[in-house]
Image: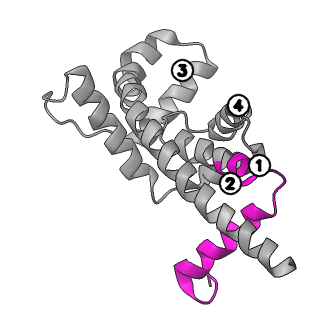
Amino acid sequence: MIWPEGGWKRYGQYILMRLNRLKGTPQEIAAGVACGVAISFTPFVGFHFVLAAITAWLVRGNILASALGTAAGNPWTFPFIWLSVLYTGRYVLGTGDVPSTKVDFLSVFEKGMHALMTFDFTMFFHDIWPILWPMMVGCIPFYIISWGVSYYLFKIALERIARRRKEKKL
């Protein structure tokens, strides 16, 4: 069984309880989670943990919570994230009316890693950059919105849990 008894609601409560046990204030933990969620919208697959930790450190969020927040990007959500980010970037850059070509993201990321590891910048700028640049531009609005929404939601939820816990002790 993948999910505990009770389904999604109970799983969400479990995650919140685990987050609440982390050291830090609800604001710090929520900021960490928000950094992880937001980083999941960037095209820098393979660097999400590191980038989430850096951004959490910069905003004084909980670094462990940022790692947990990166779970927003997973095999089920990445295809939707990548397509949304790519087409948003193309729209912002004014190349949205380019004939729709099928993008094989797995191939793009494989070629990108190969180009970076072999320092083949000709291949990088020929094959990877036309996909990566619109994704980098397109992830900005998703990053900002997802950070704000997830921070707000997790902050409220964690403050509620802390308040209930305090009331039980009194």
Q: Residue at x 45, y 50 (%)?
A: 78
Which portion, as a residue range, is magenta? 1-30
Q: CA distance from mark 4 to mark 1?
A: 11 Å
Q: Residues within 10 Å of mark 2 (few under 14, many from 20)?
A: some
- Residue 67 visible (yes or no): no
Amino acid bearing label 4: Ile
Residue 61: x and y in percent read 72, 41
Q: CA distance from mark 3 to mark 2?
A: 30 Å
Amino acid bearing label 1: Leu
Q: CA distance from mark 3 to mark 4?
A: 25 Å
First in sequence: mark 1 or mark 3? 1
Q: Which mark is residue 54?
A: 4
Q: Which mark is residue 115?
A: 3
Q: Secondary structure at mark 4?
A: helix
First in sequence: mark 3 or mark 2? 2
**Any magenta on residue 161?**
no
Q: Are marks 4 and 2 in contact (CB under 8 Å)?
A: no
Residue behind mark 2: 68
Amino acid bearing label 2: Leu
